[in-house]
Structure formats: structure tokens, C-alpha cells
Image (cartoon, helix red, strand yellow):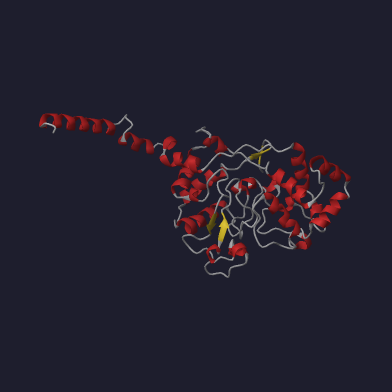
Amino acid sequence: MIKKPAAAFVIGLLLLAWWAMSSPGTNGGIAQAKESRAPATTPSLSNGRAALLPLPPVPAIGREKAALGERLFFEKRLSRDNTISCASCHDPARGGTDRRPVSIGIDGHTGPINAPTVFNAALNFVQFWDGRAASLEEQAAGPVHNPLEMGANWALVISKLTNDESYRLAFAQIYPQGITGETIADAIAAFEHTLLTPSRFDLFLAGNPHALNKQEQDGYRRFLDYGCASCHQGANIGGNMFQRFGVMADYFAGRTPTAADLGRFNVTQREADRHVFKVPSLRNVALTAPYFHDASAQTLEEAIMIMGRVQLGRELTIPDTQAIAAFLKTLNGHWRGHPLP
């Protein structure tokens, strides 16, 4: 048993240690509380660096294959009437989209849904809003066969490309089997793997505190603190999960849903997947208006306010919206050494 004087001495040491740990200038609680209010070292920004990741380097793709894929990406002979290419709806000069509410296909047909950007699509865990394609290769084949988009088929496309000697030679150099549906899709996907767009935000994540100004860092902090990063996360800042559109409020209230509004339900026929979509990437989002699968938001600020209400259950203020928009604009990237227009 410890005698009373010794016990008092031990208690005194414990109190002294507690006081020291709680004093300014130490690693204790008071110092940590002060640090949490400092913009450069807030826990939210530190946590965000775990949730939001820098863009990975462009993978090693053979130069000849990527060049062939790029040529095919802009090739209108993939469509039945030689008028539509992949770039018609996913134009690198327009943020990887067409900046239309819905895309226009052969014979003037309009699609049912807003075209997502092709930039950084290689980082998505699935493709299309409803996730019906598991890979870029599978996605590349979809529009070729869609009657509202290219309205063709592999047999027709192969016959066109085979009649072009330059294509025969290019395919023969890369693929022993020559021109097939699989090799066409593989080459296009190879090119799309190169469409990564590093931004100022990546410099910030890499440790450069001056890459973002005060308002942009404030927007980043609000983006994290309000919970936006619970869905828009990872290197693509989205694109790695499904989520219901309208978690906290019914986005579709008061209107008759279209087939496109059903989202993942169209693929699985599961009631739980009604109005569930692949979370889109926010990289280059300031360049890809209009927003959402239905193109209902015309401006970035409008989209932010809608997301706050229906996904977070929060009515964002004008300062909130301005700060978050300033942060999102830091995600505008560079491609081939130039900023995206």
C-alpha cells in the first residue's frame, strides 16, 4: 500500500504533467485547439488530403497506340453516315463535353442525357451516369451501336476502316489480329487513358500552400466541413461510387421522371437503385456546364446550391457558394501543357 505522503507526491506529479500538456506551446490540447483554427493546419484540410488525392501520372501507353486511338476518337467514319465522332460529344476543346443539355447524334437525333466529360474518365470506377459500362473499352463500343448516337455496328465500321490503307497499316503495327471491334475500342481507350488534367489543386495537395489563395482555401475547407468530400473524393474527386440524387430532399418532386432520371435502376431493375447515379468527377467542373444528368443547372453556383439542399440538407449562403465555386475552379486542369479552354 502507498503511504499518504508518497501518494500525494504521485498525485502532484500527475497534476503537473496534465498542466504541462495543457499549456500553450506544447503538443497538448490548448495548443492543438489553436492550431485547428490556423488555415494552414486545420484538421479539416489535413483530413481532406486523405480524402482527396493528387492526380496520378499518365500511365505508360505506347505512343503508336495512343496516336491511333486519338485518330479514331476524332474519326467520323465510326458513325453510320460519317457525321459523328467521339469528339462530337466529348470535345477536348469544350472541357471534354459538348456543353449542350443533351448531345446530337446522326440524323439530328438528340440523346436523353447530358454528356459527361471524357477528361479523367479513366479514373472512374465505371462509365456512363448509370454505370452500365465496366471499362473504357466497353464504353467506347456503346455509342457506335446506339441508334441515337452513331447508329452503326462493328461490321460496318470495320469495312470502312479496312478500305483505308493507312488504318490497315497502323492496326497491323500494333495488333496482330488487325482491325476488329475489340482493337478499335482498345485503341480509343488507350488514348482516353492519357486524358488526365493536373491542376493547381494538385500542387496544393503536393504541399505547395501558395497554389491556392485565401478564398480558394476557404472554399476547400467548406467543401470538406460540409461533407461534399463524402461523395466527391479520391484522385478524380468523384467517379468512384454510386449515390442517390436527393439524399436529403426529393430532387425529382413535382415532375414526371424520365427514363434518364431513373439512373442505375435502368441497369439493375432494383428499386433501391432508383435515382442512383455514378457520382461525377469535379475535375474541370467549371468548364462543363450545364450540370447534372438532366442539365438543369446552368451555372456552377446554381449547381452548388442545389447540391447543398438535396444532398447535404443545407441551405448554402452566398459566401458559401462563392467560396466553394472558387475552390472548384482550382480543379481546372492542363492538358498537353496548356490550360483547358
In the depicted view, which residue is nearer to us: 182 or 236? 182
- The quadrant of the rendering that contains the C terminus is top right
Instruction: Left or right? Give the position of 299 relative to 110.
Output: left
Q: Exactly how many numbered labels are in the figure?
A: 0
- The quadrant of the rendering that contains the N terminus is top left
x, y percentage for residue 216? 50, 41
Which residue is at the far front? 1
In the depicted view, which residue is nearer to us: 30 or 212? 30
Q: Is residue 54 above or below residue 103?
A: above
x, y percentage for residue 171? 81, 44
Instruction: Left or right? Give the position of 224 relative to 57.
Output: left
- Residue 340 occupies which quadrant of the picture? top right
- Residue 44 occupies which quadrant of the picture? top left
x, y percentage for residue 158? 83, 53
- Residue 263 occupies which quadrant of the picture? bottom right
Instruction: Left or right? Give the position of 91 relative to 235.
Output: right
Residue at the location (67% across, 59% down)? Answer: 102
Q: Is residue 328 above or below residue 32?
A: below
x, y percentage for residue 152? 79, 59
Q: Is residue 24 above or below residue 80?
A: above
